């Protein structure tokens, strides 16, 4: 059960939600005045590699315009702070902007040189755009592991080991610790780890996917966003 921890923020969000739904766009102003300077500074820092302050302004302005439709702020439940809630929305708008810019640049580079091949699209692996996207993917995985840890720490630990490249036997060895173990004991533990990890509904991978779906939905993303 989710517990409200930020009552003042929840009251502000609910009041703003009601007014926005009633057509009063000025209701967003208290939230805007409270967080705009912070969000502006954050966005400038995130895209400083591009050297375009106007771009940061556009992103933040579009973010505030988006909030006028009321859907996002009406979804706030007071579990986290309103600042954290809005930060997550803004952060993904920054990522969307960077992704679109990256695609435009790739297209422009491709049509400007007739001898460029499609594989050249992957040549900018160290670009700021790719670096930012990679960081966001890591953040999504981290948030998913945290959610899984709250409900099933063992499954979260198995997923973490899997992401580190360990096989089932290596996972079993880590779970068994440094105490002496026979081949029979190790095989039994390895089989148990594999069964737990791959079980269709209640296995570690299945639980991780379920948590990931919740994280993606919360951030208004689809699986395709992880693949771009």
Image: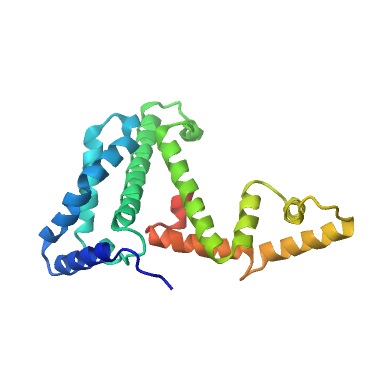
Quarter-of-image position of residue 56: top left
Residue sitting at 64 percent across and 61 percent down? Answer: 154
Relative depth, front residue between 190 and 185? 185
User: Where is residue 94 shown, x and y percent of the image?
Assistant: 33, 44
User: Where is residue 80 shown, x and y percent of the image?
Assistant: 36, 60
Residue 171 horizontal side relative to residue 91, left or right: right
Q: Would residue 228 be seen by someone viewing this image from the given angle?
A: no
Relative depth, front residue between 158 and 51? 158
Relative depth, front residue between 125 and 27? 27
Way the structure is coloured = rainbow
Residue 33 horizontal side relative to residue 45, left or right: left
Q: Is residue 73 above or below residue 34?
A: below
Quarter-of-image position of residue 172: bottom right
Tell me how many marks there are: 0
Q: Is residue 124 above or below residue 1?
A: above
Q: Is residue 56 above or below residue 145?
A: above
Q: Would residue 72 be seen by someone viewing this image from the given angle?
A: yes
Residue 169 horizontal side relative to residue 14, left or right: right
Residue sitting at 55 percent across and 60 percent down? Answer: 149
Q: Please state, as top left, top right, bottom left or bottom right, where the N terminus lies in the image.
A: bottom left
User: Where is residue 199 shown, x and y percent of the image?
Assistant: 67, 68
User: Where is residue 72 shown, x and y percent of the image?
Assistant: 28, 61
Q: Is residue 125 above or below residue 8?
A: above
């Amino acid at each position: 059960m989710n517990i409200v921890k930020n009552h003042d923020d929840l009251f502000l969000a609910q009041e703003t939600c009601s007014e926005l739904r009633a057509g009063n766009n000025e209701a967003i102003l208290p939230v805007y005045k409270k967080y705009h300077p912070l969000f502006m500074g954050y966005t400038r820092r995130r895209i400083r590699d591009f050297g375009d302050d106007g771009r940061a302004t556009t992103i933040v302005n579009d973010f505030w315009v988006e909030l006028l439709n009321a859907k996002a702020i009406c979804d706030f439940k007071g579990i986290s702070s309103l600042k954290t809630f809005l930060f997550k929305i803004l952060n993904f708008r920054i990522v969307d902007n960077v992704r679109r810019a990256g695609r435009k640049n790739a297209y422009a580079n491709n049509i400007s040189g007739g001898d460029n091949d499609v594989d050249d699209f992957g040549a900018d692996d160290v670009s700021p755009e790719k670096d930012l996207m990679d960081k966001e993917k890591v953040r999504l995985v981290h948030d998913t592991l945290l959610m899984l840890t709250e409900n099933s720490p063992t499954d979260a630990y198995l997923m973490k080991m899997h992401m580190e490249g360990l096989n089932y036997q290596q996972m079993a060895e880590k779970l068994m610790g440094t105490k002496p173990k026979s081949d029979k004991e190790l095989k039994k533990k390895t089989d148990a780890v594999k069964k737990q990890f791959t079980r269709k509904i209640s296995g570690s991978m299945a639980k991780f996917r379920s948590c990931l779906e919740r994280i993606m939905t919360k951030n208004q993303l689809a699986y395709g966003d992880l693949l771009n």
